[in-house]
Image (spheres, helix red, strand yellow):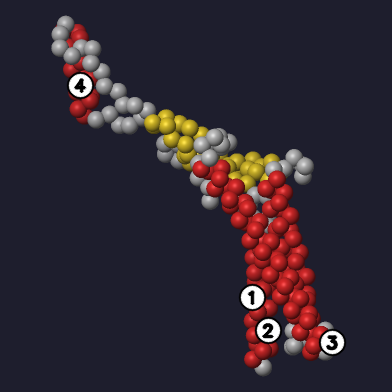
């Protein structure tokens, strides 16, 4: 009885993992990059294994499917293959597990059922390895691009001028007044250096 309960729990956990992997495959937000303005987010770029999209500040989205399998980057092709393999292996592992469970009437003798259950476990492990490798490969690519200073795609640079202090404003004012009166600090001018920021956020 205890072994039967363990088999049922293991089967439910394996099915839950397979369902989660299957739902991850068509998920839209594998990669998200936002461009922020002074007040609101001006644009959001997001992509998955099948398409890339952009959403503006009004909420309107424009998407473009990847045109061709041969034109894709190598890591996207690899992630597609690994995730599809994970889903397929999980499906066959579920079928084998049903035949190998002691509580089912199919599968033959207990010895044959034990072999089928062992095969189902191996298939589930392979499915998990495929999904883990695909997600890790995609995440590694995103991280590498984010920290690569030479990668400029969807990295929008904009200038930020710091707020002028009260003291510098007074110096500018005195300088302009002194120039009109013919003396003092008429030619002195204080400016705030611009700083460059690259705004690129991935989720």
Query: Is residue 17 visible in the rendered structure shown here?
Result: yes
**Residue at label 1?**
13
Which mark is drawn over residue 108?
Answer: 3
The residues bearing labels 1 and 3 have C-alpha atoms spaced at a distance of 24 Å
Foreground disc of the pair 1, 3:
3
The residues bearing labels 4 and 2 have C-alpha atoms spaced at a distance of 80 Å
The residues bearing labels 2 and 1 have C-alpha atoms spaced at a distance of 10 Å
In the image shown, does 102 or 183 lie closer to the viewer? 102
Which mark is drawn over residue 7?
Answer: 2
- Vertical placement of residue 182 versus 18, above or below: above
The residues bearing labels 4 and 1 have C-alpha atoms spaced at a distance of 71 Å
Percent across and percent down for residue 130 are 69, 61
Q: Quadrant of residue 25?
A: bottom right
Contact (Cβ within 8 Å) of mark 3 with mark 2: no
Foreground disc of the pair 3, 4:
3
Percent across and percent down for residue 189 are 25, 18
In the image shown, does 5 or 62 lie closer to the viewer? 5
Q: Quadrant of the N terminus?
A: bottom right
The residues bearing labels 3 and 2 have C-alpha atoms spaced at a distance of 17 Å
Which residue is drawn at the image coordinates 68% and 84% (left, top)? Answer: 7
**Residue at label 4?**
171
Q: Residues within 10 Å of mark 2 (few under 14, many from 20)?
A: some
The answer to which of marks 3 and 4 sits earlier in the sequence is: 3
In the image shown, does 103 or 118 lie closer to the viewer? 118
- Vertical placement of residue 174 versus 154, above or below: above
Query: Is residue 19 visible in the rendered structure shown here?
Result: no
The residues bearing labels 3 and 4 have C-alpha atoms spaced at a distance of 93 Å
Q: Residues within 10 Å of mark 3 (few under 14, many from 20)?
A: some
SS at circle 3? loop
Farthest residue to the bottom: give it: 1
């Amino acid at each position: 009885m205890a072994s039967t309960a363990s088999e049922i729990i293991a089967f439910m956990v394996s099915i839950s993992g397979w369902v989660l992997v299957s739902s991850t495959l068509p998920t839209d937000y594998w990669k998200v990059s936002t461009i922020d303005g002074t007040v609101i987010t001006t644009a959001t770029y997001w992509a998955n294994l099948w398409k890339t999209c952009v959403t503006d500040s009004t909420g309107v989205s424009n998407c473009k499917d990847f045109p061709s399998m041969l034109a894709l980057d190598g890591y996207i092709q690899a992630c597609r293959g690994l995730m599809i393999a994970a889903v397929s292996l999980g499906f066959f592992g579920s079928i084998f597990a049903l035949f190998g469970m002691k509580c089912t009437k199919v599968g033959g003798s207990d010895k044959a059922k034990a072999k089928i259950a062992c095969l189902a476990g191996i298939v589930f492990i392979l499915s998990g390895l495929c999904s883990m490798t695909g997600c890790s490969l995609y995440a590694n690519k995103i991280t590498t691009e984010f920290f690569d200073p030479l990668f400029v795609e969807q990295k929008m640079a904009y200038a930020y001028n710091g707020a002028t202090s009260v003291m510098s404003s007074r110096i500018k004012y005195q300088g302009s007044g002194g120039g009109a009166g013919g003396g003092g600090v008429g030619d002195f001018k204080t400016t705030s250096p611009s700083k460059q920021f690259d705004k690129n956020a991935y989720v």
